[in-house]
Image (cartoon, grey):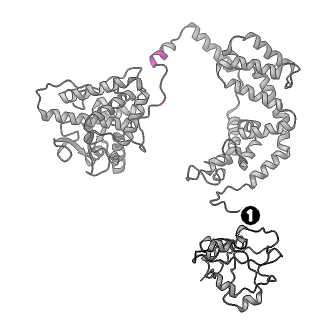
């Protein structure tokens, strides 16, 4: 197959074709001339395949572009060659992502793409069914040479779910193409070759066809992270030939055009200077709310620049406290207030206090009806009229008689025609909108609710707290480490120093006591300080282990067990005894706001 094949015609109903593609196709045809003088010289290589595959390097195409179009800058020529590669007119043999950027070296080898696989061919569309057949065909072949990449396997699984009803058709087409490929036949516009041809030639053509097909789908279905140059855009519902038939002029079409132009002449047209002045005023007013124009509009950080998502959290649809710019924007116009769901809720709360909630409720019901399904329009219109427009209803709104007459007349004329009843309540809705705009909206801006909302929005922090320790009101400037806890004394040592007095200012009621670990509770003494006749302190109750004789029964026969596993009680020590006796050391327990543990202090 040669590149000089005649270009396939594109009819009127094909996709729109840009003129730049015609220029690139002419360029490729001139490159592929095999006279050796005006075209690029192809060289056979054996390093990639067992058969000789003709290809050219990046230096060859860049030198040809510089010579043919008098390009002095190498970067400009490389950029032009890269566009030819990304649009699928040439393709790298190794299919590496780096090779799709043409460089002025011989690190990558390229080949010309077949004209059938050029962009915007009539029969070379890249629809999803053809892509599913291509992936199915590759999955049926050798896994080592034609195995699917992870993103291709994921796309293939999705396509099988979408085309579940065509799964048999896709598999049948793929198996037929694999069978014909093994028999030595060619697809995509090739004529069938006889089986008696040399195996070498069939192998070479088969390899080239696989490369061309893979290059075609690499352009139309690129890997994740790559730019999709062949973006198709929205699908058409009408073909250009059908639209041309509708544009045919007749007597009625000319009359309609004349009527439209007469109405256009009657419309008032402002001067261009006034339009530009109003546009500049609007731009100056809303510039501080645009995060692309003003960096202060995207606090605490711009999510389009950084990876911080806090901006989306504080500007969500409904938040506890809105941002300051959001609240300020409500004061610009009534439209900004009602189009924001947070502002609409605040305004609704204000009207509830003003005993005029039915106005905003009517406006919201009409909006929901206009944006609702067609099947529920007639029912919703009747319910709204009976709820808000009928006389003596508990939620009757203040509408003048002329507007009410227009609405009732439209209801009678369009009854039974739900497609025409969607906008019959617009006169009443517009009347209520203007009423709220001129009366309720100014009072809302002067109300304490709005003023308090601005103060709360101004004072709210916009920084993330990484840790939620404490209330955050007080900060510890300095943390004094507690001394290291000494070795706990045994019960025998405490019996020697059993001089206890309760007048020590160190062990007061407010001093927090150290909570011992349960690991050495067996070494603690079970003696209690008799502060009353019952041997118990005020507020204490006798434990079962304190009963006489129970300790001896529990410890009988166990010489290792010296005491019960009980939490020791506090032993207040006098200051003089604490100074004189070095064997009994007290623990300097850290305060509540000190987070340093006793075992983490200085030695």
Which residue is located at x 65 percent, y 84 percent?
492
Which residue is disc 1 drawn over? 473
Which residue is located at x 37 percent, y 30 percent?
126
State the extent of the magenta-drawn residues as a range.
232-243
Image side of residue 445 versus residue 17, left or right: right
Q: Is residue 18 visible?
A: no
Which corner quadrant holds the N terminus? top left
Q: Is residue 24 visible?
A: yes
x, y percent for residue 120: 37, 29
Image side of residue 513 versus residue 54, left or right: right
Q: Is residue 242 magenta?
A: yes
Answer above or below: position of 242 versus 36.
above
Which residue is located at x 34 percent, y 24 percent?
168
State the residue lying farthest toward the right: 392
Crowding at mark 1 (Cα within 10 Å: few <14, some 14-19, many 20+)? few
Q: Is residue 324 magenta?
A: no
x, y percent for residue 466: 62, 59
x, y percent for residue 377: 69, 19
Image side of residue 331 versus residue 306, left or right: right
State the residue lying farthest toward the bottom: 580
Image side of residue 509 versus residue 310, left or right: right
Which corner quadrant holds the C terminus? bottom right
Answer above or below: position of 221 versus 189.
below
**What is the count of numbered marks?**
1
Which residue is located at x 64 percent, y 54 percent?
300
User: What SS does tag 1 mark?
Assistant: loop
x, y percent for residue 223: 39, 42
Residue situated in front as seen by the camera: 588 or 270: 588
Residue situated in front as seen by the camera: 562 or 579: 562
């Amino acid at each position: 197959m040669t590149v000089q094949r005649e270009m396939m015609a594109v009819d009127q109903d094909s996709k729109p074709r840009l003129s730049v593609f015609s220029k690139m196709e002419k360029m490729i045809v001139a490159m592929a001339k095999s006279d050796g003088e005006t075209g690029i010289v192809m060289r056979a290589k054996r390093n990639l395949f067992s058969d000789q595959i003709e290809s050219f390097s990046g230096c060859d195409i860049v030198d040809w572009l510089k010579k043919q179009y008098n390009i002095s800058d190498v970067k400009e020529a490389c950029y032009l060659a890269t566009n030819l590669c990304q649009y699928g007119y040439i393709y790298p043999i190794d299919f590496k992502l780096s090779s799709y950027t043409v460089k002025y070296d011989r690190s990558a080898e390229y080949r010309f793409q077949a004209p059938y696989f050029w962009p915007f061919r009539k029969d070379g569309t890249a629809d999803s069914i053809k892509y599913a057949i291509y992936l199915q065909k590759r999955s049926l072949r050798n896994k080592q040479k034609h195995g699917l990449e992870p993103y291709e396997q994921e796309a293939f699984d999705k396509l099988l779910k979408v085309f579940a009803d065509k799964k048999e058709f896709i598999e049948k087409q793929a198996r037929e193409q694999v069978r014909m490929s093994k028999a030595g036949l060619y697809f995509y516009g090739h004529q069938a070759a006889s089986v008696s041809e040399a195996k070498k030639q069939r192998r070479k053509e088969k390899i080239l066809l696989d490369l061309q097909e893979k290059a075609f789908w690499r352009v139309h279905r690129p890997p994740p992270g790559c730019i999709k140059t062949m973006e198709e855009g929205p699908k058409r519902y009408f073909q250009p030939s059908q639209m041309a038939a509708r544009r045919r002029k007749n007597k009625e079409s000319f009359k309609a055009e004349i009527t439209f132009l007469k109405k256009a002449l009657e419309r008032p047209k402002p001067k261009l200077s006034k339009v530009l002045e109003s546009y500049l005023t609007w731009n100056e007013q809303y510039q501080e709310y645009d995060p692309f124009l003003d960096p202060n509009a995207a606090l605490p950080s711009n999510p389009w620049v950084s990876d911080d998502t806090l901006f989306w959290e504080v500007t969500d649809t409904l938040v506890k406290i809105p941002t300051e710019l959001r609240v300020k924007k409500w004061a610009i116009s009534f439209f900004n207030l009602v189009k924001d769901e947070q502002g609409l809720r605040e305004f609704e709360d204000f009207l509830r206090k003003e005993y005029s909630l039915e106005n905003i409720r009517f406006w919201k019901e009409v909006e929901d009806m206009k944006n609702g399904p067609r099947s529920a329009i007639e029912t919703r219109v009747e319910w709204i009229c009976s709820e808000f427009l009928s006389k003596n209803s508990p939620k009757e709104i203040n509408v003048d008689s002329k507007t009410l007459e227009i609405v009732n007349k439209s209801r009678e004329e369009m009854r039974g025609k739900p497609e025409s009843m969607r906008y019959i309540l617009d006169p009443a809705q517009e009347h209520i909108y203007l009423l709220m705009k001129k009366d309720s909206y100014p009072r809302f801006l002067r109300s304490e609710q709005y003023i308090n909302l601005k103060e709360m929005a101004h004072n709210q922090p916009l920084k993330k707290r990484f840790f939620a320790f404490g209330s955050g009101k007080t900060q510890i400037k300095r943390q004094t480490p507690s001394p290291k806890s000494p070795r706990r004394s045994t019960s025998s040592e405490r019996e020697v120093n059993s001089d206890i007095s309760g007048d020590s200012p160190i062990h007061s009621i407010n001093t927090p006591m150290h909570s011992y670990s349960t690991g050495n509770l067996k070494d603690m003494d079970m003696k209690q300080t008799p502060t009353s006749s019952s041997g118990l302190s005020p507020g204490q109750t006798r434990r079962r282990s304190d009963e006489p004789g129970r300790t001896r029964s529990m410890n009988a026969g166990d010489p290792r067990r010296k005491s019960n596993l009980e939490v020791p009680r506090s032993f207040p020590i006098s200051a003089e005894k604490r100074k004189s006796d070095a064997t009994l050391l007290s623990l300097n327990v850290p305060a509540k706001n000190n987070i340093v543990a006793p075992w983490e202090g200085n030695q």
